[in-house]
Amino acid sequence: AANAFIGSVAVDPGDGTLMLGTGLGLFRLERGAKKPERVVGTLDTPDGAGELSSNLVVRYAGPGALLGSGHPAGAGSLPENLGLIRSADAGDTWEAVSELGESDFHILQATGDHVVAVRVEESDVLVSTDGGRSFEAKAAPELPLDVAFDPSDPKRMVVATGQGTFSSSDGGGSWRPRDPVATDQLAWG
């Protein structure tokens, strides 16, 4: 049986295109379309190339600026963990940004050059101010289940954990408890 989870939902702020990262593949639903289209993109790196489709987490950093992380599809010479990748053509072609072969980001948020990411089963929140080319690790109070930040002031962020929600006003340098109820999904209002 196929793994039918939905790992991410992202809306292009420029044209309203919806991208769904699922266990069954990456799907694009353009504004006004009745049915999503499965996207099988390619990633070419100096160390190898291959197709990407399922098991991707995707986010828009701005109009048409798609970021992602996950794993390659089937055959090819790409590493198991894709690090942070970028597509300027709605997922048809990708380029490596950072951490190729090293990281699998299951949590990813972006606005412009500000990117926040969390590696699978790790507790540090990684913060980038250069579009994800480099990251600074910030210790979270508990294992993050989701992260969101204020697009108008990315130093303000919240993290959802099994112990509740915590907030930071200094880019993850310090955290304070906000709500003791366990939460696993966040969105900045």
Image (spheres, helix red, strand yellow):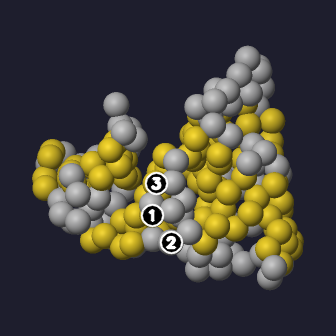
Badge 3 crowding class, 10 Å Cα cut-off, few under 14, some 14 to 19, many 20 or more, is some
Q: Secondary structure at mark 1?
A: strand
Residue lying furthest top in this view? 32
Q: Position of residue 161 (x, y in %)?
A: 28, 56
Q: Secondary structure at mark 3?
A: strand
Marking on residue 128 = 1
Q: Amino acid at mark 1?
A: Ser
Instruction: State whether residue 18 is above or below residue 171.
Output: above
- The alpha-carbon separation of the residues under discs 1 and 2 comes to 6 Å
Marking on residue 99 = none
Q: Earlier in the sequence, mark 1 or mark 2?
A: 1
Name which residue lies at 79% across and 74% down.
Answer: 45
- The alpha-carbon separation of the residues under discs 3 and 1 comes to 6 Å
**Which residue has dot 3 on it?**
114
Report if the CB atoms under discs 3 and 1 are less than 8 Å apart: yes
Q: Position of residue 77 (x, y in %)?
A: 83, 78
Name which residue lies at 76% across and 58% down.
Answer: 94
Q: Earlier in the sequence, mark 3 or mark 2?
A: 3
Report if the CB atoms under discs 1 and 2 are less than 8 Å apart: yes
**Which residue has dot 2 on it?**
134
Q: Amino acid at mark 3?
A: His
Q: Is residue 128 visible?
A: yes
Q: Amino acid at mark 2?
A: Ser
Answer with left or right where residue 165 lies relative to residue 45: left
